[in-house]
């Protein structure tokens, strides 16, 4: 079978997929769930419960009032004991609903899904996905219903199921493909119907050939002739949307644009499973598969964990720590975020939690040395950016120049820092520049909106004054 890949840049970090053969094991729901009200890209949720309320599993506790948003549901039954700021995996504090578990495991009602895909309209399918709070589960957390609602003038030709899972430690997607292949295919068919895409592709890295065989067999068994399973080369960041599209379709997503510009939608395989469960079973997103791994955890494996379960609970239920914890990472080692507290909870975007001991000191950021202009960061950047120049511009506080150098197109994959012999903090500085530019753009947009509003108000007042003057002249005249 042919192997597809993107040509520019990319690296092959040493794999440590020690949990590959560990099927999902459900953890006991937590005694206290900490459920952030904002765990997706877009507008935060509005709480629709209050302290003292009793809630059931699947009940909406945070409503999505904006288009780019997704509701949040209770993941355990019990009493709402607080609503307050709590630690969030992105390093901030987020308004969260704290629920004390009554362990009755009561659901808000019977789960009801659609009877058949053929008899359901696109609108009904999107509503199901939106109401059930489905977001991108590969880590991006973009609301899925929004992704499936492209502008009317955009034609989607293909939906790509992303089964690359290129992070060195993570095996969540692999286990989803091995244990829920039927649901992945269902999810893909649902999204193809919604977008009217004629073609579906399931792209899987070469280090997961058994998943390729399994999904191929299932596609064949169901006699689906417009879904193809293909191999992509094991290479980081093969799972990036733009890299996957380039590898599979040979198309380049323009700078600053989305995959729909080239007629494609990319969806993580875990998201497709959740889409299938939302549509066919009526199940909201209350739990997810998480790879728990690293040298400092006693029982590494893949676990099904309720959203809102804190790291403290996970440590207790997976046998405890085997050594002093020196680094805790949410996500993979390449793109994950280091945590400073064990009280951070699992969210919809948590694909992995890594625990490392003393040996991590060897991996810790070393003192930076001067840039030697070797250009490795340029050679290996999968986007084709020039990280060293962006880094220099950022250090000189020349934000305009970082913008000119397309810092906002960075996917923060970490490859530039990984290959830099001088241990420069390239990813960190490019990310900072990107955030500064985006913040500045928001401010400019807000200023422009305010200016237009004042201008419109002045024009309206002037028009009213003119009309009033005209009426006065009529009376006098």
Image: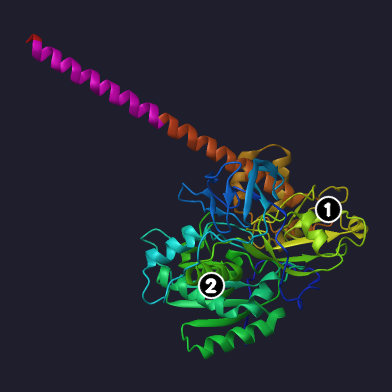
Residues packed near mark 1 inside 10 Å, few (<14), some (14 to 19) or many (20 plus): some
Residues packed near mark 2 inside 10 Å, few (<14), some (14 to 19) or many (20 plus): many
Q: In this rendering, which labeled residue sits more in front, label 1 or label 2?
A: 2
Dot 2 falls on a residue whose secondary structure is: strand
Up/down of 241 relative to 92, above or below: below
User: Which residue is the site of mark 2?
Assistant: 160
Could you say where residue 277 lies in the image, as x and y percent from the top left?
53, 70
**Span shown in magenta:** 452-475
On-image quarter of the N terminus: bottom right
| Depth check, front residue: 45 or 357 | 45
Could you say where residue 475 lies in the image, as x and y percent from the top left?
9, 12
Dot 1 falls on a residue whose secondary structure is: loop
**CA gap, disc 1 and disc 2:** 35 Å
459 in magenta: yes
Q: Is residue 56 left or right of residue 290?
A: left
Q: Can you name the residue that lies furthest to the left here?
A: 477
Residue at screen point 78% across, 60% down: 314
Could you say where residue 468 lies in the image, as x and y percent from the top left?
19, 17
For marks 1 and 2 on the same chain, the one whose residue lies earlier in the sequence: 2
Could you say where residue 149 lies in the image, as x and y percent from the top left?
43, 60
3 in magenta: no
Residue at screen point 18% across, 15% down: 469
User: Which residue is the site of mark 1?
Assistant: 423
């Amino acid at each position: 079978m042919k192997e597809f890949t993107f040509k520019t840049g990319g690296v092959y970090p040493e794999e440590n997929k020690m949990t590959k053969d560990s099927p999902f094991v459900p953890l006991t729901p937590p005694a206290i769930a900490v459920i952030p009200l904002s765990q997706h890209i877009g507008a935060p949720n509005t709480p629709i419960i209050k302290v003292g309320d009793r809630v059931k599993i699947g009940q909406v506790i945070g409503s999505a009032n904006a288009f780019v948003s997704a509701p949040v549901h209770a993941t355990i039954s019990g009493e709402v004991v607080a609503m307050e700021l709590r630690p969030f995996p992105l390093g901030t504090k987020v308004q969260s609903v704290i629920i004390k578990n009554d362990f009755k495991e009561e659901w808000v009602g019977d789960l009801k899904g659609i009877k058949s895909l053929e008899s359901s309209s696109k609108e009904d399918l999107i509503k199901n996905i939106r109401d059930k709070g489905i977001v991108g589960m590969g880590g991006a957390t973009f609301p899925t219903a929004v992704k499936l609602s492209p502008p009317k003038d955009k034609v989607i030709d293909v939906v790509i199921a992303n089964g690359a899972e290129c992070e060195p430690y993570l095996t969540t997607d692999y286990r989803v493909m091995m244990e829920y292949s039927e649901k992945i295919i269902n999810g893909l068919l649902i999204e193809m119907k919604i977008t009217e895409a004629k073609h579906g592709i399931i792209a899987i890295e070469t280090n997961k050939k058994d998943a390729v065989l399994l999904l191929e067999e299932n596609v064949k068994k169901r006699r689906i002739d417009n879904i193809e399973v293909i191999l992509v080369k094991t290479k980081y960041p093969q799972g990036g949307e733009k890299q996957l599209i380039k590898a599979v379709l040979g198309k380049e997503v323009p700078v600053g644009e989305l995959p729909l510009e080239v007629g494609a939608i990319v969806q993580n395989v875990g998201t497709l499973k959740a889409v299938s469960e939302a549509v066919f079973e009526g199940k909201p997103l209350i739990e997810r598969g998480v790879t728990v791994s690293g040298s400092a955890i006693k029982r590494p494996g893949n676990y099904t964990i309720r959203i809102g379960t804190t790291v403290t609970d996970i440590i207790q239920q997976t046998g405890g720590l085997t050594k002093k914890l020196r680094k805790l990472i949410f996500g993979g080692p390449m793109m994950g975020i280091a945590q400073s507290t064990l009280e951070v909870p699992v969210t919809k975007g948590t694909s992995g939690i890594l625990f490392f001991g003393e040996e991590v000191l060897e991996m810790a950021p070393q003192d930076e040395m001067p840039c030697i202009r070797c250009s490795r960061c340029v050679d290996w950047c999968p986007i084709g950016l020039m990280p060293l120049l962006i880094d220099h511009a950022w250090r000189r506080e020349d934000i305009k120049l970082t913008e000119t150098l397309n810092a906002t197109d960075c996917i923060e994959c970490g490859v530039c820092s990984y290959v830099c012999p001088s241990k420069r903090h390239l990813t960190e500085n490019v990310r900072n520049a990107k955030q500064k530019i985006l913040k500045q753009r928001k401010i400019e947009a807000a200023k422009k909106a305010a200016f237009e509003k004042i201008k419109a108000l002045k024009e309206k007042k002037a028009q009213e004054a003119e009309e009033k003057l005209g009426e006065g002249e009529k009376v006098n005249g």
